[in-house]
Amino acid sequence: SDVSLTAAAAPDATTATTTQVVSTTPPPNAAALASMLASMSPPSITSTIASSTRSSTNTPSGVAKTVRGEVRHVLGGAAELRTALEEASAAGALTVVDWSIPTCGPCQRIRPAYAAMALVRQNVQFVGVDAHASAENASLARDASVRAFPTFHLYANMRRVGEMSGADETRLAALIDAHAAPAAAEIIVSPVPNSSPAVTASVPGSTTSMDTMQAAIASALTTLRGACAGLPEFVTATKTALLFVGNVLDNPGDGKYRKVRLANPGFRAKLGRFTGGIAVMEAFGFEKQGDGDDLVLVMSELSATHPGLPAMRALLERAVPPVG
């Protein structure tokens, strides 16, 4: 094999027992949903890594581009994975590899959370290997002794230092944080079309950074999807959230569009009644105010100018899977 897939000696605490978690009956269009959430950093709004760093460690030219807030999908098997590991090793970064197959329900359910982890852990390289995507990937999975999906392998300096199987987001995050080095790259957010000039990840005058907003929306949508009985219900709920966000963007300066009563029958029936529904609105910048029947979601004038709003609205309007 072109890449070392054997595990280095590591404490037992970093290696989870492999369990069979493969499902042959994934939710309808689950892959489309996962792809939508995993693509929440298109070129127009993606986080890129600047050549300067916060630490004194120098990152070799051409390496930092692979350690960014998105999942790197491998299609070429061992050779391609080896390249990714070499680049991350040269940058002193941890690499996490997500082994999955399209027919595995748990794989699809954790995929949005995995993408969200990539957004907020800019110092870690996140890789996805679909074992059914190519013959090379299938061979690579066999060489890596992957017997259950999803399985996650952690690599440092070209050696496997940890692993776990199963769609446990909390356990995966803890495993990653136990091995990841401190962030070593300054994040710059590219300009969004028809919005303000290029800004740093911390938006001036705002308490929420661009990448934090994206991660919060991804996490809230994942919770919302789990609370909905099916994909049509989830799409309706998502479009309802986008309707209220669109009202804010399309009517700047009009305060009535920045307020939503939680008792509003339409809002409650299509979005508010679901676990995660309110969290989606809060991820976009709405805040709860009042109590009882007077409880409302309000977006401040400042939050209404956040450059992430039009970017996320446009992305989700394009990406929400059709129902029919």
Image (cartoon, rainbow, N blue to C red):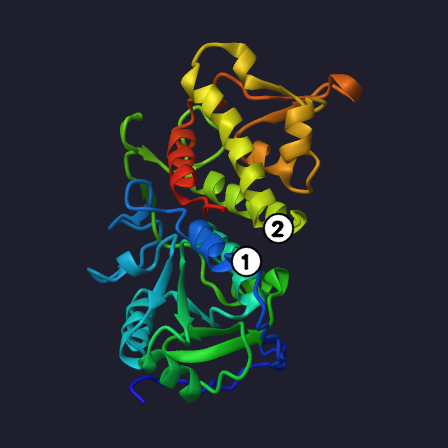
Residue in the image at 53% along x and 72% along y = 150
Q: Nearer the viewer, residue 16 or 108?
A: 108
Q: Nearer the viewer, residue 202 or 226?
A: 226
Q: Nearer the viewer, residue 281 or 2?
A: 281
Q: Position of residue 146 (x, y in %)?
A: 49, 83
**Res. 28 mark:** 1
Report the amino acid beneath label 1.
Answer: Pro
Residue in the image at 63% along x and 80% along y = 19
Element on which disc 2 rests = loop
* Vertical relation: 121 (above or below) 80: above
In primary-sequence order, the first of circles 2 and 1 is 1
Q: Are marks 2 and 1 in contact (CB under 8 Å)?
A: yes
Query: Distance of mark 2 from mark 1, alpha carbons?
Result: 8 Å
Report the amino acid beneath label 2.
Answer: Gly
Left or right: residue 155 compared with residue 13: left
Q: Position of residue 259 (x, y in %)?
A: 59, 17
Q: Quadrant of the N terminus?
A: bottom left
* Vertical relation: 28 (above or below) 163: above
Residue 175 in view, yes or no: no
Left or right: residue 122 compared with residue 188: right
**Res. 159 mark:** none
Residue in the image at 54% along x and 32% along y = 241
Left or right: residue 252 compared with residue 58: right
Label 2 Cα neighbours within 10 Å, binned few <14 / some 14-19 / many ≥20: few
Q: Which residue is mark 2?
A: 230
Count of numbered labels shown in the rendering: 2
Residue 209 in view, yes or no: yes
Furthest-front residue in this view: 324
